[in-house]
Image: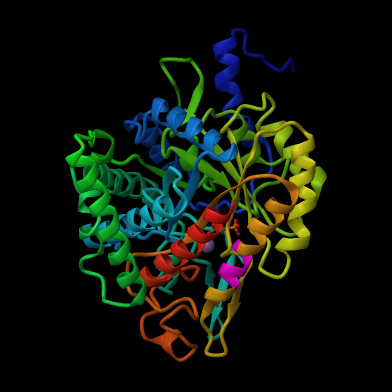
Amino acid sequence: MPVSTPDTPEAALLAGLDAWRALPAAQQPGWPDLAVLDEVTTELASCPPLVFAGECDDLKSRLAAAARGEAFLLQGGDCAETFADATADRIRNKVKTMLQMAVVLTYGASMPVIKLGRMAGQYSKPRSSPTEVRDGVELHAYRGDAINDYAFTPQSRVPDPRRLLKAYHTSSATLNLIRAFTKGGFADLRHVHEWNRGFVANAANARYEAMARDIDRAMRFMAACGGDFDALRTVDFYSSHEALLLDYERPLTRIDSRTGTPYNVSAHFVWIGERTRQLDGAHVDLMSRVRNPIGVKLGPSTSPDDALALVDKLDPEREPGRLTFVSRMGAGRVRTALPPLVEAVARSGSTVLWVCDPMHANTFESSSGYKTRRFDDVIDEVTGFFEVHARLGTVPGGVHMELTGDDVTECLGGAEHIDEADLATRYETLCDPRLNHQQSLEVAFLVAEMLGDR
Ligand code: PEP
Ligand code: MN
């Protein structure tokens, strides 16, 4: 039978957006009811975009500046957002934490900081095993709120496509609040002190207060000189998530009316995870066709040829800001595993932005059974990342962190010296352990020093 081929460029473009369906797609849920999935994806395809393509382009040009060493990317948020935690308080605490970290970095390094939340869409998770066993009972693994519920009951763990709609609407509400906070006056730099309010007093907060006083004084000085503060009134805060769940990402991929090209309108930036970056796989194919700035996580098993093949597939035009490589090697391996990749990419003429995720290769299980990370390993990996780039004359362009604005006890160490016994007091994540508010500020101060020395 002859295979029908699309006969116009527009039809070919649209057909391309479904090419992934014929390719192996890792980490997808086995939806039990395909008729419901079909209804849901049809409805998603008619929902308004969450972001505008022009905003994605703005982010892309800022990421290009970061790749040149003229800006720095701060990407952060939960490992897995949950529907229950999409409350005003929790969202505000996360936004405040990011704003505080960004101001610490900006002030410490005199460099623009791009704020990119792992927020408003981070609802699906790759898992190392498709099932979870507790006391001899085996159920589907929890794959994120967009797919199933965390409660360990057979009913809760069945993948339910209707949750994709809830993921969309919760992303929409979250992004709306983020936009209100960051455009409506709350992020005005003259409120630099207020972002610290409501957090428990500790050493990092005190250091922040002292810095905020300096910033205040500088701004009063500028005002007295007749300075114009328009640029300080609002903040551009972008959204990102892992583009894991193709039944969600595809209906939210649309043709931009300005350019006639496809954009993923579920977030400004989307990334391909370490477990789904197969060169001939569905994720790489779909992401190769959207025009957003995109990322790929690279773990220690990545070869220079893998990295180069990803550059050729995802950034054939060598477009500045298009491609970000998020290295997650582990504190013990970053100094040896990263250099061959950075060197190979530099030789390719690509303008990739290098970002350090010092979280995902530093996870281990505590003796008390909690998945955790050591604050010192996080800092050591970022330090190694900066060392590698300094040695090679390349640019360490940003950090990618799992953090929350709440006072949780999920990562060990930091100035509060959270120890294994403390983990039990406030361990709330449904997936990976996050830095709490104080640990996040501490990281920002340490990274600001590294950035200042760069
Ligand atoms: C994550 O970012 O939560 C994640 C699963 O990361 P990675 O793909 O790097 O393992
Ligand atoms: Mn994670």
- Image side of residue 20 versus residue 241, left or right: right
Q: 365 and 97: which one is in front?
A: 97
Q: Position of residue 90 (x, y in %)?
A: 27, 62
Residue at 71% x, 55% y: name it.
Answer: 388
Q: Is residue 344 visible?
A: yes
Q: Position of residue 363 (x, y in %)?
A: 59, 72
Q: Position of residue 77 (x, y in %)?
A: 42, 58
In the image, residue 283 above or below residue 449: above
Residue at 67% x, 23% y: name it.
Answer: 317
- Image side of residue 174 versus residue 274, left or right: left
Q: 393 and 218: which one is in front?
A: 218
Question: What stretch of residues is rendered in magenta?
Answer: 377-382
Q: Position of residue 3 (x, y in %)?
A: 71, 18
Residue at 27% x, 40% y: name it.
Answer: 232
Q: 348 and 267: which one is in front?
A: 348
Q: 299 and 21: which one is in front?
A: 299
- Image side of residue 381 versus residue 215, left or right: right
In the image, residue 99 above or below residue 44: below
Quarter location, residue 12: top right
